[in-house]
Image (cartoon, rainbow, N blue to C red):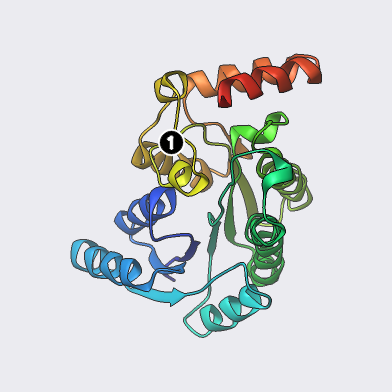
Amino acid sequence: MKELAIITGASSGIGLDIARSLGKRQFDLIVAARREDRLLRLKQELESAHKIQVHVLPCDLSLPQAAQELYRKASTLGRVTALVNNAGFGIKGPFVNHEPSQLRNMLAVNVTSLTDLTRLFLPDMVANKHGYIMQIASIGAFQPSPEYAVYSATKSYVLSFSYALNRELSGSGVSVTTICPGITETEFHTVARHQKSAFLNLMNMKSDAVAEASVRAMLSRKAILIPGFLNRVNSLLMESMPRWLSTAIAGAAVR
């Protein structure tokens, strides 16, 4: 049976390039995001290039019941064998200045919908003894990040939850791969209203390179991937430092 993957946040950045990477591997796809026009262009591109089926499901995962509705619609399209929880966003700035509604939306997308979608799609994969789940976290998961306090906390949740779940699923035929990208050329910083410093620009990785490495890691059932040598070194250093020091360094890097 042909593999069928669902990818959230597939209209741009890493999610879009993951769709391209899976498409060239002959996965049929379900692409989900808010911007239907971009998804339709992606559908046309991938169906033409790879002779696969691409289903478009517009959705806003910050809304209540959005995950349940996405699962319901996706289930009518075939047996999903790969779930890519890529949707997410950050807001930069002092916590005290953030609108509560923005924070709730970020928690809903980064944490609640990711957890709900994992719980909804997982039982079918376990029953069929075959499946892949990819969770997009961040190198921000490894230390508190001033100016991104809530965002980095959401990614710490993704890392902890997903790493533990992968261990729970050992021997089931289903694996959970957690991806922790660093600075990547996507729309993330534009949405976050963050002008990147020269230092951060030095750490930039191309979105397609991150996506390709992520797909390879998922298909080889790796538990975790930190794309990029400098990002791996940085994460190891941050984890080995006292928390107060890693937090201070993270705050200076963001500024």
Which corner quadrant holds the C terminus? Answer: top right
254 relative position to 156: left or right:
left
* 203 is higher (above) or lower (below) than 93: above
Q: Quarter of the image holding residue 46?
A: bottom left
208 relative position to 255: left or right:
left
Which residue is at a point 61% across and 37% down the rendered structure image? 224
* 72 is higher (above) or lower (below) than 178: below
* 140 is higher (above) or lower (below) than 155: above
Q: Nearer the viewer, residue 44 or 141?
A: 141
Which residue is at a point 51% across and 40% down the rendered structure image? 217
Q: Residue 168 location in percent, x, y?
A: 79, 51
* 32 is higher (above) or lower (below) than 235: below
Q: Residue 161 location in percent, x, y?
A: 75, 48
Considering the numbered disc 1 on the image, is that residue within a helix, a strand or a loop? Answer: loop
Q: Residue 17 location in percent, x, y?
A: 36, 50
Q: Quarter of the image holding residue 251?
A: top right
| Residue 173 visible somewhere in the drawing | yes
Residue at the left extreme of this rendering: 48
Q: Nearer the viewer, residue 217 or 100?
A: 100
Which residue is at a point 64% across and 51% down the rendered structure image? 175
Which residue has dot 1 on it? 184
Which residue is at a point 47% across and 82% down the rendered structure image? 77
Q: Residue 72 location in percent, x, y?
A: 59, 83
Residue at the front extreme of this rendering: 97
Label 1 sits on what residue type?
Thr
Q: Could you classify mark 1 by the number of other residues whose Cα lies within 10 Å: few (under 14), some (14-19), or many (20 or more)? A: many
